[in-house]
């Protein structure tokens, strides 16, 4: 049971962490979610702090200090390591991300936190980079069904105008911004 809970937490935390690029046009609720057009995957690699997210079952035990680390792999995939604080101490979830289509945008990814031997099952989750600051300092990541959303930054906190811009980027894509909850970061 503990393994299943850990896998579920890993999947949730992993989905939080792969954002990048700029919005591709105004959206309204009911319209299609649009990923950023150009994502330089190498610039996207590294550490990202979760500033906010939609509540989700995967991260239910996370009380704060959510950080995601991305690293390129020789096979073209991306190693994903999510960490967070819980009431019982820090936990970590490791996964892998891949492009959905070799010909599609690099910002349309899938992540998997389940063990590789289960890869024949539908254990991949959508991970779309919906907004990315030109300097890759902030990102908004979500799913095309708008069920999941994460706001990420290279730093544990951002100023109020930057945070407001990120919230507006989510709203422009048709996300219900009233559902967004801030993520406590003790490094603030």
Image (cartoon, rainbow, N blue to C red):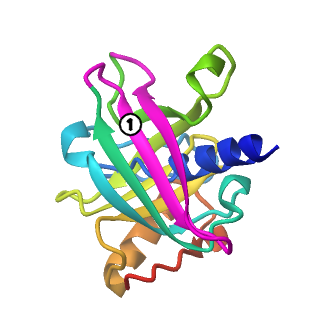
User: Is residue 174 magenta-colored?
Assistant: no
- Residue 133 position in % (x across, y down): 25, 60
Residue 132 located left or right of residue 33: left
| 79 with respect to 28 (left or right) | left
Q: Which residue occupies the foreground of this view, 175 or 100?
A: 100
The residues colored magenta run: 74-102
Residue at (17, 59) in percent of width and height: 135
Query: Residue 126: where, in percent of width, then height?
Result: 55, 36
The count of marks equals: 1
Observer-nearest of 102 and 37 = 102
Q: Position of residue 128 (x, y in %)?
A: 46, 41
Q: What residue is drawn where x is 56% and y is 22%?
A: 116
Quadrant of res 70: top left
Quadrant position of the N terminus in the picture? top right
179 lies above or below 123: below
Which residue, given by chain and number where applicable, does mark 1 sit on? 79
170 is higher (above) or lower (below) than 8: below
Quadrant for residue 151, please give it: bottom left
Question: Which residue occupies 60% across, 28% down?
Answer: 115
Q: Residue at x 50, y 42 (%)?
A: 94
Please tell me whether residue 166 is drawn above or below residue 134 in the rendered image. Answer: below
């Amino acid at each position: 049971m503990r393994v299943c809970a850990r896998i579920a937490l890993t999947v949730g935390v992993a989905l939080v962490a792969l954002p990048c690029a700029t919005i591709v046009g105004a959206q309204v609720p009911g319209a299609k979610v649009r990923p950023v057009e150009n994502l330089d995957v190498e610039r996207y690699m590294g550490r990202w702090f979760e500033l906010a997210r939609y509540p989700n079952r995967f991260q239910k035990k996370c009380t704060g200090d959510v950080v995601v680390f991305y690293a390129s792999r020789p096979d073209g995939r991306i190693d994903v390591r999510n960490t967070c604080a819980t009431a019982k101490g820090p936990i970590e979830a490791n996964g892998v991300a891949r492009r959905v289509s070799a010909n599609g945008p690099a910002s349309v990814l899938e992540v998997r936190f389940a063990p590789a031997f289960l890869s024949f099952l539908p254990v991949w989750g959508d991970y779309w980079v919906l907004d990315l600051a030109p300097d890759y300092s902030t990102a908004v990541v979500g799913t095309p069904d708008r069920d999941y959303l994460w706001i990420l930054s290279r730093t544990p906190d951002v100023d109020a105008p930057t945070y407001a811009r990120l919230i507006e980027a989510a709203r422009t894509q048709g996300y219900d911004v009233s559902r967004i909850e801030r993520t406590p970061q003790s490094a603030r």
